Image (cartoon, helix red, strand yellow):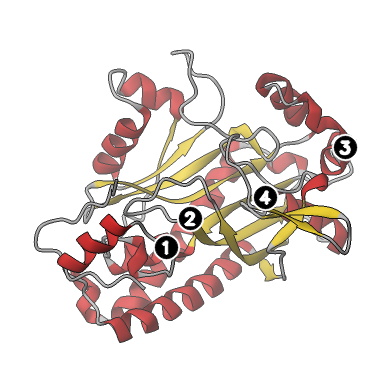
Amino acid sequence: MSKVFIPAGYHSCLSLYDTQKAISLIKRVFEDTLCGNLNLSRVSAPLFVEASTGLNDDLNGVERPVSFDVPDIGRDAQVVHSLAKWKRLALHRYGFRPGKGLYTDMNAIRRDETLDNIHSIYVDQWDWEKVITPEERNVAYLKATVQSIVDAIVSTQRTLRAIYPQLNTVPDLVPEVTFITTQELEDRYPDLTPKERENAIAKECGTVFLMQIGGELRSGKPHDGRAPDYDDWTLNGDLLVYNRVLGTAFELSSMGIRVDPAALDRQLTISGCENRRTLPFHRMLLAGELPLTIGGGIGQSRLCMFLMGTVHIGEVQSSVWDDDTVKKCEEAGIILL
């Protein structure tokens, strides 16, 4: 059953032709600005990895990857969910030093995604990772990095509007970030569900970085699930903005300071994933052989949606949709790419 929501009277601000040009502009301008702000260099990245390496990410801990056999090598491969662990290994292999990082265009298939206005089985994002020092593994450094990303989005929005003034009707991104932990959010809205809490704080503040996702709250439940082997659950978060077109919180990025050996050891035990200790990536990390890093993913189609004021992610990316979604969009005059 379709979960698509189309506000009354909605129509795209741009023609189909200008939509394609605007998508290209957003990606080019934001990419350049982000690289300058965070000191990142572009690298090539895999579409799939060997299943036996432990490099793929299971995100919330339960998603199934798309797997296939490769007869010529006699092993199975998996289409990536994200590149969180691969990037850290790449920084090690390529010899990146503290203060420098990498980014790549990440394309993934998430087969278990529930399709709606903002979710597709096809994921496109800027995946980035940066080497840090032990002294930078703290909340202040995390917050400064988040602000640099928001600054890049604000700059991109200005450039986009200068070329497409019809997008001036799209609400401004609030440049000041409100930082709040998941426990503080639960205390603030104890009677709401996690998603309702996100909607409430985003509507109130505009731009929010919700910190410390993955660990158990005082209610006995985590705000949301996180895999135990990339983010440090005490030093991570989601960048949320308020999407006035949809009337909800809208996640643009999930990111964080990554696990060090102690955090990985602790989170593997908490999550009951002791078997991962024997995988090559995890052995290297537990032995202290990988650099300390911060990193994340920034949704390309999500950012385009937000800056262009579109109501459905299918307006800015090509994917597959159920018949009911296609019908409702056609009836509303919405063109899915």
> Secondary structure under badge 3?
helix
Q: Which residue is mark 1?
A: 320
Residue depth check, mark 2 versus mark 4: number of the one nearer the observer: 2
Q: Nearer the viewer, residue 296 or 124?
A: 124
The spot of residue 128 in percent (x, y) is 63, 59
Q: Nearer the viewer, residue 113 or 146?
A: 113
The CA distance from mark 3 to mark 1 is: 38 Å
Residue depth check, mark 4 versus mark 1: number of the one nearer the observer: 1
> Secondary structure under badge 2?
loop
The CA distance from mark 4 to mark 1 is: 26 Å
Rendered residue at 34%/51% (across/down): 116
* Left or right of residue 245, residue 136 in this image: right
Q: Which residue is mark 4?
A: 84
Mark sitting earlier along the chain (4/1) = 4
> Secondary structure under badge 1?
loop
Q: Image quadrant for the N terminus? A: top left
Q: Which residue is mark 3?
A: 283
* Left or right of residue 221, residue 322 in this image: left
Residue depth check, mark 1 versus mark 2: number of the one nearer the observer: 1
